[in-house]
Image: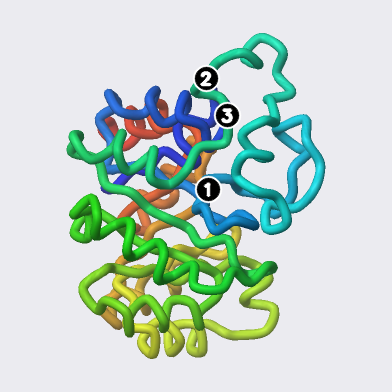
């Protein structure tokens, strides 16, 4: 089963920082998951929220700030505030870190709420620069973005992210139809919505099912029984231990 460190080893280290990513490298896992947005001056940066304030001490939206402005903000965690690897990183920095390893990288484009012009092209260009096409999955809640990825490079694997909000407007049949139209390799459902029917029907359509975000041992055991193909977790070492015991 594929296990991904969600936003790095974020259960113990600051999410989406080089520190959290470095702490994931030596774990016996499939890969790392991260979130990508675009600054005012066009730099691809790794950050989950569309705005600052939850993890870092700054204010404002990622889209309206320059990279230099983002680099100046510090973690709210006083113990780690002076660490150079606890700043907001660029996607390129993470690719440089991951390239020499055996890890894969799941890049989530955070464009379901904010639109970033040309972000798909920018990500693919960078992935190709590091020759990481075969080791990358690009995921998004925005299916239009996944269609653009496929048109730009049909060899790069994509995943449609789905959660309770998605199923509020679409049933499973429609969700799987979208996956087919986008030529997705994966469907990434929330652990809140995954069930036996979803896994079974997705597999019938040739889709691999990787579930987010799995931090419960009980839920993990349920997913093993459902025969999902992978999980994203804040506690990759713990979840990996459960998988090794159960399988």
Residue 35 or 199: which is nearer the viewer?
A: 35
Q: Which mark is residue 87?
A: 3
Q: Secondary structure at mark 3?
A: loop
Percent from the top left, x then y, of residue 33?
42, 46
Residue 212 or 141: which is nearer the viewer?
A: 141
Q: Is residue 227 visible?
A: no
Q: Which mark is residue 97?
A: none
Q: Which mark is residue 84?
A: 2
Mark earlier in primary sequence (3, 1):
1
Task: Please name the residue shown 50% across and 44% down the image.
Answer: 214
Vertical position of residue 191 compared to residue 159: above or below: above
Percent from the top left, x then y, of residue 9?
46, 30
Q: Is residue 192 visible?
A: yes
Q: CA distance from mark 1 to mark 2?
A: 15 Å
Q: Secondary structure at mark 2?
A: helix
Task: Please name the residue shown 38% across and 39% down the image.
Answer: 94
Mark earlier in primary sequence (1, 2):
1
Q: CA distance from mark 3 to mark 2?
A: 6 Å
Verify CB contact (< 8 Å) between mark 3 and mark 2.
Answer: yes
Task: Please name the residue shown 72% across and 32% down the image.
Answer: 56
Q: Secondary structure at mark 1?
A: strand
Left or right? Give the position of 246 relative to 193. Answer: left
Residue marked by disc 1: 45
Q: Residues within 10 Å of mark 2 (few under 14, many from 20)?
A: some
Query: If the image is split into quadrants, where does the C terminus sit?
Result: top left
């Amino acid at each position: 089963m594929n296990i991904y460190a969600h936003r790095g080893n974020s259960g113990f280290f600051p999410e989406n920082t080089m520190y959290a990513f470095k702490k994931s490298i030596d774990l016996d896992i499939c890969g790392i998951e991260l979130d990508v947005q675009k600054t005012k001056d066009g730099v691809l940066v790794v950050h989950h929220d569309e705005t600052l304030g939850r993890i870092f001490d700054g204010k404002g939206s990622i889209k309206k700030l320059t990279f230099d402005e983002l680099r100046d903000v510090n973690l709210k965690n006083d113990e780690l505030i002076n660490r150079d690897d606890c700043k907001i990183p660029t996607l390129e920095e993470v690719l440089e870190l991951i390239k020499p390893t055996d890890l894969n990288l799941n890049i989530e484009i955070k464009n379901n709420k904010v639109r970033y012009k040309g972000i798909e092209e920018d990500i693919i260009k960078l992935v190709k620069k590091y020759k990481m096409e075969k080791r990358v999955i690009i995921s998004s809640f925005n299916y239009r973005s996944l269609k653009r990825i496929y048109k730009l490079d049909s060899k790069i694997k994509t995943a449609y992210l789905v959660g309770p909000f998605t199923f509020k407007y679409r049933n499973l049949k429609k969700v799987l139809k979208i996956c087919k139209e986008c030529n997705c390799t994966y469907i990434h459902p929330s652990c809140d919505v995954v069930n036996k029917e979803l896994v079974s029907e997705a597999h019938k359509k040739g889709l691999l099912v990787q579930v987010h975000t799995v931090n419960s041992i009980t839920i993990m055991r349920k997913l093993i029984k459902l025969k999902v193909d992978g999980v994203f977790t804040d506690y990759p070492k713990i979840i990996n231990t459960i998988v090794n015991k159960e399988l």
